[in-house]
Image (cartoon, grey):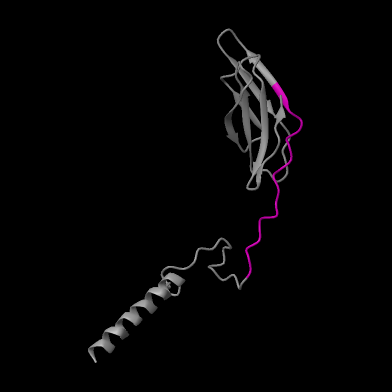
Amino acid sequence: MKKQYILAVVIGVMLICGMILAGCGSSVDDPEPTTSGNNGNNNGTVPSKPTGKPPNTPTGTRKSVNSSAYSTTVTLSWNAVSGATGYYVYRSNASLRYTKIATTSSTSYTDYGGSKTSSYKVSAYNSYGESAEASF
């Protein structure tokens, strides 16, 4: 009788371990992760990918330089882009490498650290990505 009891316990432990390894032991407190935004109720379907696209490249770029004996300010402006959340502004350094210097929701930006010879680019962005850059 004792051997049968031990055998039953071993089989029970093996079944429980097998269920856990197979994922049958998950609980309500540990739901499967989901990216569909519907609390895991996918009804057997795969969540769809976003269908939007990045905004178009800004157009109508204008650059105005105001220099005095003490400082130089460079004011940049461009036309609004439909569907854009905001804009990234880039300035080149002496080796013509561009660095992002600002993020703005406005269609203009004044750079107080630029020079008469600084080159600039601007791009539009939204939740789907960034547009190509427009040069000044």
Q: Quarter of the image holding residue 79?
A: top right
Residue 84 in the figure: left or right of residue 42 = right
Most foreground residue, 70 or 52: 52
Q: Main secondary structure of the magenta part?
A: loop
In the image, is residue 14 part of the stretch drawn in magenta?
Answer: no
In which image quadrant can residue 69 be found?
A: top right
At horizontal 62% and vertical 38% (from top left) the residue drawn is: 105
| Of residues 87 and 4, the one drawn nearer to the viewer in this rendering | 4
Q: Quadrant of the N terminus?
A: bottom left
Direction bottom: furthest residue: 1
Q: Does the stretch in magenta take in 60?
A: yes
Count the numbered circles shown: 0
Q: Is residue 111 above or below residue 106?
A: above
Please give the name of the residue rendered at 66% of the width and 24% of the height, measured from the top-left corner: 120
Q: Residue furthest right?
A: 60
Question: Could you tell me residue 81's position as x and y percent?
Answer: 72, 40
Q: Position of residue 71 (x, y in %)?
A: 57, 13
Observer-nearest residue: 3 or 19?
Answer: 3
- The span shown in magenta is 45-63
For residue 4, above or below residue 121: below
Determine whether 106 is above or below 7 in the image: above
* Residue 56 on image: x %, y %: 74, 40
Residue at x-position 68% and y-position 43%: 84
Image quarter in which the C terminus is found:
top right
Outermost residue to the left:
2
Horizontal side of residue 17 vs 83, given as left or right:
left
Instruction: Name the residue at the top extreme.
Output: 69
**In which quadrant of the rendered view does residue 49 lie?**
bottom right
- Closest to the observer: 133 or 102? 133
Q: Is residue 80 left or right of residue 86?
A: right
